[in-house]
Each structure stands twice: as structure tokens, then as C-alpha cells.
Amino acid sequence: MSDKQAVVRGETEIQALLPRVDVFEDDNGIQLFADLPGVPKERLVVNVEGDTLLLEGEIMPAMSEQLEAVYAEVQLSRFRRAFTLSSELDTTQIDAELRDGVLNLRVPKHAHAQPQKIAVKSE
């Protein structure tokens, strides 16, 4: 995770981490990889609102409830990242998987936006 982002909700400003993300595109859609170490699936929210893809949640370090922090460098436990999606992408067909701290998200293009091979006839 890196950097901070101020998120304004109502009158309250919430600081959130910006996870590092790689996005790749091919003829069939986009593939997004987000580094989310320490984020359990239950604390991860992936939403699409209009043309915006939103990733947000909380980092939950695995530790006993009896432990008390004596020294902590990580002050923020929330993260948030938003992306504007192209209208070529089919947001109803998004596939997401969280494995080993990496979110792998696939957003396919609509069929009409994918390249089509045209058959050429001859006499």
C-alpha cells in the first residue's frame, strides 16, 4: 500500500491508503491487479457505481486480541481506490479473486466492442 488519500464523507474527512494497482488491457477487456496485503475477503468491498469502479476496505493484521500495540508505524487501516471505466467495458460481467494479498479483477469488453474478424469472399 502506498500514499494517502483524503476521502470526504459528509462533514468528516477520512484518511485512506491508496493501494498499488497495475492495469493491463487486451482485445477482450482489462485485467487489474491490486496489492492488498493483510486484507481479508470479508473486509474488501468492490463496487461499480455508474462508470466508477471502487475498491475499499480495511487492513486487519492477524494477531491475538490480548496483544496491545506498543509501537505502530501503520496509522491507517482503511484503503480506497476509484477508477473511471470506459463504456466499452461490461461491468455486469466483472470477475474478482483475492489470493495471497493480490486482488485479480477482470472486466471484459462488451461483445460489440471486441475486435471481429471479417470473412472475405472471392468469386
Image (cartoon, rainbow, N blue to C red):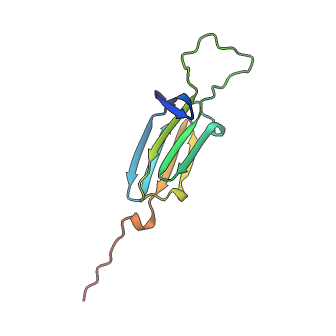
Q: Residue furthest right?
A: 66
Query: In the rendered view, does 101 fall on the left or right side of 88?
Result: right
- Does the image show residue 62? yes
- Of 10 and 93, nearer the camera is 10
Quadrant in which the C terminus appears? bottom left
- Front-most of residues 9 and 117: 9
* Vertical side of 13 occupied by 83: above or below: below
Q: Residue furthest top?
A: 70
- Which residue shows up at 74% across the image and 21% down it? 65
Residue 115: give x, y in percent of width and height.
Answer: 36, 65
Considering every residue shown, the one lying at the far left of the view is: 123
* Residue 36 in view: no
Q: Residue at x 69, y 14 (%)?
A: 68
Q: Quadrant of residue 14?
A: top right
Instruction: Please count the marks in the image.
Output: 0
Q: Position of residue 7 (x, y in %)?
A: 51, 33
75 to 114, vertically: above or below: above
Would you say 5 lies left or right of 69 here?
left
Residue lying at 57% horizontally and 42% vertically, measured from the top left: 98
Q: Is residue 81 above or below residue 16?
A: below
Q: Residue 15: where, in percent of width, then height?
A: 52, 27
Left/right placement of residue 25 relative to residue 55 reads left
The residue lying at 41 percent from left, 44 percent from top is 23
